Amino acid sequence: MPRTAPVTRWDTDFDVLDPEYISNPFEIWDELRQGCPIAHTDRRGSNWLPTRYADVTAIAHDIEHFSSLEVGVIPFDGEPTEEQDRVLPYGLPPISADPPLHTWTRRLLLPWFSHRRVEGYEELTRELCRSAIAGFDAGGRADAAEEYAQQIPVRVIAQVLGVPIELADTFTGWVRDVLEFADDEERRFRGMEGLIKYFLVELEERKKNPGTDLLSELLHTEVDGALVEESLVLGVAALVLIAGIDTTWSAIGSSLWHLATHPEDRKRLAEEPEIWPLAIEELLRAYSPVTMGRLVTSDVEFAGCPMKEGDHVLLNFPAANRDPETFEDAEEVILDRAHNRHVAFGSGIHRCAGSNLARMELRVALEEWMKAIPEFRIAEGEEVTWAGGQVRGPRRLPVVFP
């Protein structure tokens, strides 16, 4: 079936790149949960889409039948280039690895995103937010996605990796190529190629002149008496850049979209600062950006669905977080929601290792925005555009303010 064919039945022919799905997936998830909670499509291969919290989390925890060796929502049609295959034989661990490789590569990353380490990046994050706001048009207009949300995480991650913040726009371009242009194989390969070539040079530099950054530490770390393979270091570095940028700026942008369209919630945050911690979790639940892929390792029947070896399952964490069987008034954003076991950062062994950093960046970005711009709204007559597929979030968010 042509990829451009419109969807006529979401239960048997869904398409996560369909414009309707990208712009407003919530009603589609509601419809599927009631009639076909695990949808199927043969677009881009055989794919399953669970929409209930219980199903999504059960699959996430079943690493025997559902492998993480292919986590992309949209699979590559072509083969990796010779260089990509040579320098990234393990993909992007730990996210694209199963145990035991997943276990020890994740363990290497966790200290870099501990609460204590993340606290050290908070002042930098605040400075980045204030600087971005200071650069807004004096006429009271800004693109809250492009000029704000997208400017922050990439620069924080650059600090973690020890690479120049001045290259932030270049990094952003590569990440968008890899994640956003799912039906453009040439562009996806180009983005990954750019990342690989850049980090290969950086690794050589760190061998000669190690610093205190993540790249340097990984290069000089031993596991079972041997240095970590450079291909693994490269994969981890690429993962940190890709996973640490688009996901977080999407969460920031979606939260700003919500506040721009819900003045009553802006008022609550201003008048009840004590609810900020709960509000951050609720915005993460309501606007979870990430869907992850899993590869079916052997024929298995799950919740009555005959999944075959080689099929893909799209772990729809955003839909799980809107499941009314798990969350009371699931479609409402309740800033002081007390019981909130959301899975915005995934579930199971692959739960996001950088969740502490993402939370901090989201909190600081919203705090600094609300301090400087407590009143704002979507610019009248202008369009908000969204990216979707693997990561959903606003890419253009024109707002006006006094």
Image: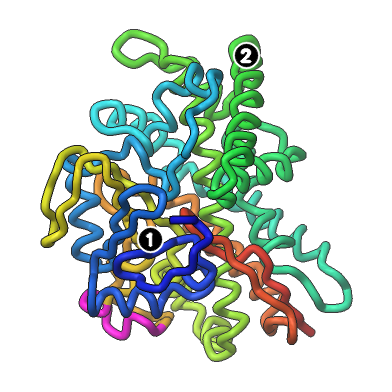
Q: What stretch is highlighted in magenta?
A: 324-332
Q: Relative to 377, is 340 above or below?
A: above
Q: Position of residue 342 (x, y in %)?
A: 32, 65
In the rendered image, the quadrant that contains the N terminus is bottom left
Other-residue count near label 2 (Cα within 10 Å), few / some / many at <14 / 14–19 / ≥20: few
Q: Where is residue 135 in the image (x, y as percent from the top left)?
A: 83, 62
Circles 2, 1 touching at the beta carbon (< 8 Å): no
Return the disc, 2 or 1, that comes first in the chain's sequence: 2
Q: What element carries label 2?
A: helix
In front here: 77 or 229?
77
Asked whether 53 falls inside the magenta stretch, the response is: no
Give how far apart the Cα atoms at labels 2 and 1 are. Answer: 36 Å
Asked whether 328 falls inside the magenta stretch, the response is: yes
In front here: 260 or 78?
78
Per the image, the residue denoted by label 1 is 344
Question: Of the numbered discs in the image, which one, if any, rests on residue 204?
Answer: 2
Amino acid type, callout 1: Ala
Residue 224 sits in which quadrant?
top left
Q: Position of residue 271 (x, y in %)?
A: 54, 87
In front here: 28 or 269?
28
Q: What element carries label 1?
A: loop
Q: Relative to 69, is 101 above or below?
A: above
Residue 197 sits in which quadrant?
top right
| Residue at the extreme bottom | 264
Residue depicted at 13% across the width and 56% down the height: 302
In front here: 337 or 230?
230
